[in-house]
Amino acid sequence: MSSLLVRNFGTHGDKVSALGLGGHHLGDAENEQTAIQIVHEAVDGGITFFDNCWEYNRGKSENWMGKGLKGRRDRVFLMTKVCTHGRDASLATQMLEESLRRLQTDHLDLWQIHGVCFDNDPELFIRPNGAAEALDRAKQQGKVRYVGFTGHKDPTIHLKMLATGFPFDAVQMPLNAFDATFHSFETQVLPELNRRGIGALGMKPFSGRGDPLKNGLLTPDEALRYAMSLPVVTTITGMDKLDVLHQNLQIAQDFQPMTLEEMEALRQRCRPVAADGRFEHYKVSLQFDNPEARMAHGFPLDAQQREVKEMLKEGENTGSPFPEMKS
Amino acid sequence: MSQGSLQDSWNMNRREFMKGAAIATAGALIGSENKAQASDQPVRPTSASQAEVGRVPQKPLGKTGINVSALGVGGYHLGTAKSQQEATEIVARALDAGVNFFDNAWEYHEGESETRLGNALQGKRDQAILMTKVCTHGRGKEVGLRMLEESLHRLKTDHLDVWQIHEVVYYNDPDLVFTPGGVAEALLLAKQQGKVRFIGFTGHKDPAIHLRMLAHDFPFDTVQMPLNCFDATFRSFETQVLPEVNRHGIAALGMKSLGGSGEMVTSGMITPEEGVRYAMSLPVATTISGMDSLTVLEQNLEIVRKFKPMEAAEMDALRERCRTFAADGRYERFKTTKFYDGDLGRQQHGYPTAKELPF
């Protein structure tokens, strides 16, 4: 077995794997034991970049990852995200403490603002007492080493976040062969990050739920290789089954970057169906906007949405995604 | 030119219509407003003091030479009304009150909206400015022309006053509309054949899509768009599309004055009167409002009859009041979610149904 490519991240000499394990899907694993097994095999296979988020599966994703990483924490680069969605710095700090507890660690390598998807999120982030202050404070306190943000909606919103002037170390975004020609993060955001020396984290190489694979439009190999061939630090993808992990590990371990011609040919093949966003629902619907984000922004929940179902069936919660506030 | 003589016959129809409608002061009003338009000034709203007191004001439909009521009856909600009888009563009451602009679309309630309006307009067709929309959603001319025949049949008429391309809301729709053999060709052909008098398009998603439609320099007579006091500061049709449309003398048709389903009112942000008055105070030909009961119609008529355009300062104050909550699009879900995108368009564009992907 060949080893997994690593790339440089940040200013402290960190190296991370070019394939990252997505936290959402870890919580979708059949059970805790499978999730732990996925984490163990991922680490053994050379994956060091671990993604997560406070709101994924109402904490289950963080809990299971924490259990899987027990005794392995120092071998990985651990990221999770905070879900203020425009709300206050104090809420962000509460969420950080909860994430650290669930992940069974005293620090994160990277802490990101989750789901920057609404047009006014940048203003709400940078306002006095906004989440930006929590990021600063956590970094000063040594609870997080790097900070960043993520979103899947619109390159314009990402650019507005960058325009706040906040010193981000990382920015996460959807990058795939469909994005390349439709509301494109690849053409509008990625070059700007590279220019500024901010770590670019790709996600959704399979368009979020693998629809282009199910439709036979792309092979997993084409989709993942395209994303990994872009100038990014890592490509994060969700793996809820060992099969999927094995498949992705194989592709990543055998990885040879696509030539420019290959990439262009793939973009052109996807272009006609990229043009109306049918394979990028995260840009054109609320489908990938989690309950926490929707409620903070006054948008409706639909009972059949996967994330809403997960939220409602989790044992401890009361139906409200908001954490208990200590006044 | 054959189109010239066609135009003359329309103008004659218009004069006959004007006589029939007996709008005493409208003639003078049209004269002055047409002049204003020729000098690139937006059409200013008609104030109640200018118009006959208690009547619904009328305004020119762009450069078409016809006049439409400042309030239009939305077709979708005619299909939501509890029965044909109620729809018939809404239409009759609207006409009596001086509302002559009727909106519809081939796909509303799978034809029920058009059928109900056709029934309701029996014997009254010549009092109405009748619009419906074609629902090709990327398909070509032939599909469009078949839909036109079906619309005419359901509406029980031999011609439409306005025929628009419905729901231009997907980012590749402008390309598909203007591709060789696309629905744009159906619009021109139907106009040449005299089956439709005027042509346009509509959409609720993104001003950028509207601007791409306009960039084709196609002879649109009308363009429909969401206009309300939230739109004014968020992905704004008011600031990006409306001035462009006015500059070209194209009639602007406003819609979604209260958020599409009254979201702006039910949230307590604005009163219906504020919402409707704001929309009507913009330089538009008409504001289309869905009314699925006589109660809603009467409420709108009450607002429109005593309508005085808002002063600039009043409009600005309302925009400012709404600005914070406009900024994430929570009350303009037609822009920010899939909720208002119909199943037929979704199907043509490879999207899940509304049931599978409500938002």
Image: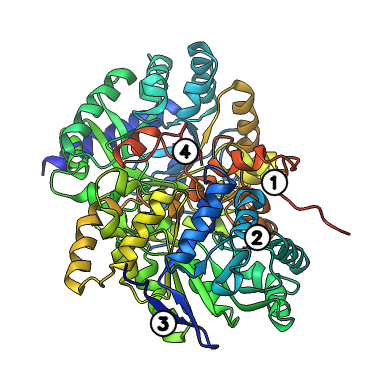
- Label 2, secondary structure: give it: loop
Q: Which residue has dot 2 on it?
A: A83
Identify which residue, A76 or B80, lies in the foreground.
Answer: A76
Identify which residue, B274 or A181, lies in the foreground.
Answer: A181
For marks 1 and 2, give the CA distance.
30 Å
- Label 3, secondary structure: give it: helix
Camera-near label (1 vs 4) is: 4
- On the image, the x and y values in percent for residue B155 come to 33, 20
**Image check: A276 left or right of B333?**
left
- Quarter of the image where the C terminus of chain A is located: bottom right
For marks 1 and 3, give the CA distance.
45 Å
- Label 1, secondary structure: give it: loop
Callout 1: few (<14), some (14-19), or many (20+) C-alpha neighbours within 10 Å? some
Camera-near label (3 vs 4) is: 3
The answer to whether A181 is drawn above or below residue A29 in the figure is below
Camera-near label (4 vs 2) is: 2
Q: On the same chain: label 4 and label 2?
A: no
- Label 4, secondary structure: give it: loop
Amino acid type for the residue under numbered disc 4: Leu
The answer to whether A124 is drawn above or below residue B79 in the figure is below
Q: Which residue has dot 1 on it?
A: B270
For marks 3 and 2, give the CA distance.
26 Å
Q: Which residue has dot 3 on it?
A: A194
**Image check: B175 left or right of B22?**
left
**In percent of the image, x 37 and y 23: which residue is there?**
B110
For marks 4 and 2, give the CA distance.
23 Å
Using the image, tell me which numbered label, if any, was put on residue B357: 4
